[in-house]
Image: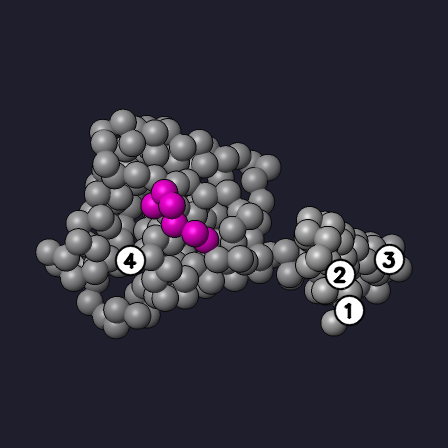
Amino acid sequence: MATKAKRKKCFVIGPIGEKGSPERTKADWLLKGIVKPVLESDPFNYDVERADQISKPGLITDQVIAAAIDADLAVADLTGANANAFYELAIRHMEQKAVIHMAEEGQPLPFDIKDYRAVFYKLEHPDDLESARAALAEQVKATEDPAYKSSNPITKARGMVELERSADSKDKLLADLVERLGRMESRLGTVEFVAAMTPPLRRACQHT
């Protein structure tokens, strides 16, 4: 008798709120209206779990951290800049494993992750849910591509550290060039900012 293939795990990170609260209602709409319909059906077939749905006995914090580390995929809802959500996201980033960022439309994302692709969703109309499901499905497909590599602020920083530690002169040269380009980009940004000033404001800055 053939054994049934083990299903992949997806852990949902994000604000949950108390039962009956507006925050819980939004979290449930996201989970049941967007994430589960995409992830639990073909072609993905994940088991989707949120922190409040972990049924095993044990310490909740330990279980959440383990889920953030061990899941095949994580979906992180960054709406409301919830501290616990960002803590769990940082753990996932440290593991350098696949994670999809999501946020309610209009939610500003912090500086460190604002340039990384995210699925922005609305919960006002059935068409909004459909659009969010389609965008999420595209991101899941990307994570399952054999050529996919996790990219986040931590992997980027780790890559620079590894280059700087390398004994290979070519790697060291590359690290130095990347650092120099970063400084040049910063200076160019300052020049563009000054150029955009009105003449009186520019003269005032030059004489400070």
Circle 3: residue type: Leu
- Quarter of the picture holding the C terminus: bottom right
Q: Position of residue 53 (x, y in %)?
A: 20, 55
Could you say which disc has been placed on residue 203 in the image?
2
Judged by depth in the image, the label closer to the viewer, 1 or 3, is 1
Judged by depth in the image, the label closer to the viewer, 4 or 3, is 4
Q: Quadrant of residue 32?
A: top left
Q: Is residue 3 above or below residue 187?
A: above
Task: Give the magenta-colored segment's residue range.
Answer: 104-109
Magenta stretch: includes residue 147? no
Q: How far is the residue under mark 4 from the one under mark 3?
A: 44 Å
Q: Quadrant of residue 130?
A: top left
Circle 1: residue type: His
Q: How far is the residue under mark 3 from the one under mark 2?
A: 39 Å
Residue with the mark numbered 4: 15
- Say left or right for 93 vs 119: right
